[in-house]
């Protein structure tokens, strides 16, 4: 979800009923060294709560120091340790999913952070590196004993990235091994999928990532369905309003970064360019979507985007 879960997107999800959100993945070493870009990934809105600060690293001391600095901001409900990112450059440092191969180091990281902060400490991981390698199931009890308050588990191997079917049976097996809460992820595209995962695996909750891009109302619909209601899809006008609001929040968010850097274009333009991936998902299914997609590079201002979106919505008759 790197590049997607910035403050504006998280704010939209939380306002639509998401129970808690996670920051983008921040480098603990960068945080300790006061790297502006690392700290920018942890920027939040005043009313953006509750939030987990999502960090990665392989050094227990650096992870603990970064967690202590994060706690001092007073903006986060918990520290989440990444032990699931499959990106090669992160795994090459012994971080991310590579920590599954070194369970003692991962447990040491949890213990070090627990000794440095009073916030809950959780672990975001996967069911394993690959089918032929050791599983996180081999480490789950060790993490519980080290003091982890919960596990967030993507039900795919790191080698699969986001491809193929999620292994919910493996997720259920891990859930049965520990007494701390386990939250499932992977293979959830609709609210009904989330409810099926909980019923099939026994997990305590569900994490939704890619399925919320362009559809932040998925959380509101999930809550409604869980209560026996039958929510209607958002109207075209509601989608247009969500796009406008999301883009406004993104311009506001980017403006903070732009105050600290020299750039050839404005924060508004940076927000518009960044928003393209979200806009494609919001507008998928509308007549005129293909033309919009081809013309995305032409937009430079918030008003240009919103005007074109409203034109398409008005003409679509969807």
Image: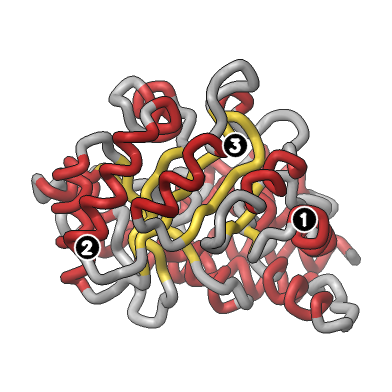
Query: Helix, strand or loop at disc 3?
Result: strand
Closer to the N terminus: mark 3 or mark 2? 2
Q: Is residue 181 above or below residue 186?
A: below
Using the rendered view, name the quadrant where residue 243 is placed.
bottom right
Q: Quick check: can you spot residue 292? A: no
State left or right for residue 36 relative to residue 291.
left
Residue plotted at (35% across, 74% down)? 45
Q: Quick check: can you spot residue 25? A: yes
- Disc sitting over residue 127 in the figure: 3
Q: Is residue 126 above or below residue 315?
A: above
Q: Is residue 227 above or below residue 187?
A: below
Using the image as rendered, state which of residue 58 and residue 174 is in the foreground: 174
Foreground mark, 3 or 2?
A: 3
How is the model colour-coded?
secondary structure
Structural distance between the alpha carbons of marks 1 and 3: 15 Å
Residue plotted at (74% across, 37% down)? 167
- Disc sitting over residue 70 in the figure: 2
- Disc sitting over residue 230 in the figure: none
Question: Mark 2, residues whose alpha carbon is within 10 Å: few (<14), some, or many (≥20)?
Answer: many
| Number of numbered tags placed on the structure image | 3
Where does residue 75 sit, x and y in percent of width and height? Answer: 29, 74
Residue plotted at (22% across, 63% down)? 70
Give the labeled residue for mark 1. Answer: 197
């Amino acid at each position: 979800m790197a590049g997607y879960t910035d403050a504006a997107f998280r704010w939209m999800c939380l306002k639509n009923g998401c129970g808690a959100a996670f920051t983008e993945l921040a480098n603990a070493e960068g945080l300790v060294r006061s790297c502006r870009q690392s700290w920018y990934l942890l920027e939040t809105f005043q009313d953006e709560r509750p939030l987990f600060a999502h960090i990665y690293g392989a050094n227990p001391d650096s992870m603990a120091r970064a967690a202590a600095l994060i706690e001092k901001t007073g903006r986060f409900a918990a520290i989440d340790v990444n032990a699931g990112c499959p990106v090669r450059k992160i795994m090459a440092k012994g971080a991310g999913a590579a920590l599954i191969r070194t369970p003692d180091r991962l447990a040491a990281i949890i213990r070090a952070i627990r000794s440095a902060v009073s916030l809950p400490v959780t672990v975001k991981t996967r069911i394993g590196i690959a089918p032929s390698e050791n599983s996180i199931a081999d480490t789950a009890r060790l993490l519980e004993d080290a003091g982890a308050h919960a596990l967030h588990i993507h039900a795919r191997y790191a080698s699969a990235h986001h491809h193929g079917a999620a292994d919910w049976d493996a997720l259920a097996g891990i859930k049965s091994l520990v007494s701390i809460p386990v939250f499932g992820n992977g293979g959830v595209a609709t609210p009904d999928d989330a409810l099926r995962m909980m019923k099939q695996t026994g997990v305590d909750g569900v994490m939704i990532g890619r399925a919320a891009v362009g559809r932040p109302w998925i959380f509101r619909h999930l809550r409604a369905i869980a209560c026996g209601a039958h929510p209607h899809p958002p109207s075209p006008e509601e989608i247009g309003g969500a796009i406008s609001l999301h883009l406004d929040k993104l311009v506001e968010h980017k403006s903070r970064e732009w105050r600290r850097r020299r750039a050839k274009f404005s924060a508004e333009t940076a927000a518009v360019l960044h928003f393209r991936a979200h806009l494609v998902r919001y507008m998928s299914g509308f007549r005129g979507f293909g033309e919009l997609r081809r013309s995305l590079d032409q937009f430079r201002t918030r008003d240009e985007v919103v005007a074109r979106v409203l034109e398409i919505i008005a003409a679509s008759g969807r």
